[in-house]
Image (cartoon, helix red, strand yellow):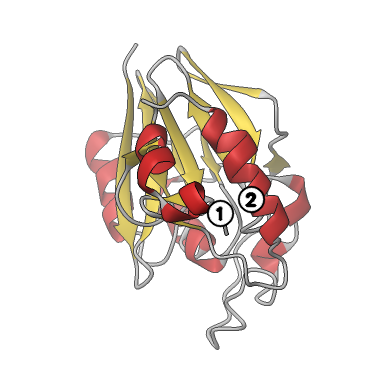
């Protein structure tokens, strides 16, 4: 069965939020500011997500959650347990620091690193990749050679690690010992910017090549 990942760059931060489909089943991964385009796509395709998965709970990845759920239905929201309070806290989700505090509904459950998630006939691995935030997680589909990595790794760059809840040591480990262990030809979908492959970043991303 074909797995399709459709990104939408939402809001001022151009946060990549993803609709993942496998057969008739779908997820939304992250839902940022101004989610109208994503919602219109779901409605046009007749898709009702099984769940909204969060790579992490910074404001630009959660701001549209309640708007999406008000239009589509009371879809369960799942994240890493270490960020269980972040949706409700502008200081933790960083919107308070930007002077535009937002909150969203709390998660309905938690995703445990190492568990397998099933969407239609597809099976996904959950990897813990802290550093940008303590609960950053990645979703990997080995059979189609695709991964959604949030704000851990970008094409040509890496996630910010200067927030109070960030850790540069954790981010180094997450990139070198978690993401760089994936196949070179695996396509990854980051939280901002264009897609890339693990091999491309291994060769050309200066933060990967020279460290940080």
The residue at 33%/41% (across/down) is 196
Vertical arrangement, residue 57 with respect to residue 201, above or below: below
The answer to which quarter of the image holds residue 125 is top right
In front here: 185 or 55?
185
**Residue that protrudes farthest toward the bottom in the picture:** 99
Mark 1, Cα crowd under 10 Å, few <14 / some 14-19 / many 20+, is: few
Q: How far from the left and from the top, in percent, is residue 9?
A: 31, 57
| Count of labels in the image | 2
| Disc ID at residue 24 | none
Vertical arrangement, residue 134 with respect to residue 124, above or below: below
The residue at 69%/70% (across/down) is 92
Q: Which quadrant: the N terminus? A: top left
Element assignment for label 2: helix
| Disc ID at residue 211 | 1
Q: Are marks 1 and 2 in contact (CB under 8 Å)?
A: yes
Vertical arrangement, residue 67 with respect to residue 189, above or below: below
The residue at 47%/47% (across/down) is 209
State left or right for residue 85 relative to residue 190: right
Q: How far from the left and from the top, in percent, is residue 23?
A: 35, 18
Mark 2, Cα crowd under 10 Å, few <14 / some 14-19 / many 20+, is: many
Q: Is residue 137 visible?
A: no
Give the Cα distance between marks 1 and 2. Answer: 8 Å
Sequence-wise, the earlier of marks 1 and 2 is 2
The residue at 50%/43% (across/down) is 149
Residue, disc 2: 172
Q: Is residue 4 visible?
A: yes
């Amino acid at each position: 069965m074909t797995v399709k990942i459709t990104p939408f760059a939402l809001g001022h931060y151009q946060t990549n939020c993803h609709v993942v489909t496998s057969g008739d089943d779908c997820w939304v991964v992250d839902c940022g500011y101004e989610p109208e385009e994503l919602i219109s796509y779901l409605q046009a395709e007749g898709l009702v997500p099984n769940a909204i998965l969060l790579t992490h709970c910074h404001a630009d990845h959660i701001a549209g959650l309640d708007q999406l759920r008000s239009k589509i239905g009371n879809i369960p929201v799942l994240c890493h347990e270490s960020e269980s309070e972040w949706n409700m806290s502008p200081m933790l989700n960083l919107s308070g620091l930007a002077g535009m505090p937002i909150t969203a509904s709390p998660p309905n459950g938690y995703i445990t690193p190492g568990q397998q998630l099933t969407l239609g006939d597809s099976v996904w691995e959950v990897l813990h990749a802290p550093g940008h935030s303590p609960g950053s997680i990645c979703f990997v589909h080995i059979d189609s050679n695709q991964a959604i990595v949030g704000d851990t790794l970008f094409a040509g760059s890496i996630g910010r690690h200067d927030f109070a809840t960030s850790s540069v040591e954790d981010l180094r480990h997450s990139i070198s010992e978690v993401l760089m262990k994936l196949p070179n030809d695996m396509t990854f979908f980051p939280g901002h910017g264009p897609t890339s492959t693990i091999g491309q970043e291994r060769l050309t991303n200066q933060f990967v090549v020279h460290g940080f």
